[in-house]
Amino acid sequence: MKNHAAFDLIVFDWDGTLMDSAGAIVVAIQKACRDLDLPPPTDAAVRQVIGLELAQALRQAVPTMPVQQMQQLAERYRFHYLGNDHELRLFANVRPMLEALTQAGKKLAVATGKSRVGLARAMRHSDTGRFFLTERTADECPSKPNPQMLLDIMDELQTPPERTLMVGDTTHDLELAHNAGVRALGVAFGAHPKAALQGAPHLAVLDTPQALQAWFFAEASAV
């Protein structure tokens, strides 16, 4: 039995899990800070907040930011990120993985810290909307690791937690899954380092997109 056979519903994070966008997010936040004469956070500090709702992410990444500059910082971030987001690409093997899982009869969904508009734009550019039955975004649900995104998706697609899998590149994703009573896979090619992911509840932490695709179609062991 293949690993995917243990699950009917597979929910993916977006940035850093399906799309190679973590680096672009880091650069956009740092440029936005420079625009407003704020000290830019380190790469590691920005990567730590990727996956959270934007306002929360900015507050944590730039703790010295005056409250009155939040809207300006968010606008400058969007300016820098959206100026290049059409150039971002899916990780290698993501498209064939999604196609194979769809052919295997899996229900696929997305739970992301992006906004609905941002996710729709990313799906349009990457031509991936056809793979997913539903999505939940950070402007529709409480920010990760609150379980509401997964609870809503499972309710809509009528799938119990024991038949649902969450796949993500941050501890926010793995904690989201844990809080919803769902098993999780971590991927160490996105925002958070492998050591951090290994400290959160998970079935496995996979190093490459190729390893993620192979995991789904490997013979099951203790899934």
Image (cartoon, rainbow, N blue to C red):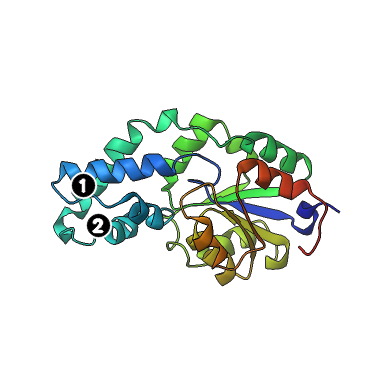
Residue 33 - label: 1
Whether the residues at callouts 1 and 2 have beta carbons within 8 Å, the answer is yes
Which of these two is toward me, 38 or 54? 38
Residue under the image location 62 percent in, 64 percent down: 202
Closer to the camera in the image, 182 or 39? 39
Question: In screen coordinates, is 222 left or right of 21?
Answer: right
For the N terminus, the quadrant is: bottom right
Give how far apart the Cα atoms at labels 1 and 2 are: 8 Å
The residue type indicated by label 2 comes to Val
Q: Which mark is residue 62?
A: 2
Q: Quick one: label 1 or label 2, which is nearer the N terminus?
A: 1
Q: Quadrant of the C terminus?
A: bottom right
Say if 36 sits above or below 87 in the image.
below
Question: Which x, y percent locates residue 56?
Answer: 33, 60
Asked if residue 141 is positioned above or below residue 94 in the image, the reply reads below
**Residue at 44 percent of width and 53 percent of height:** 113
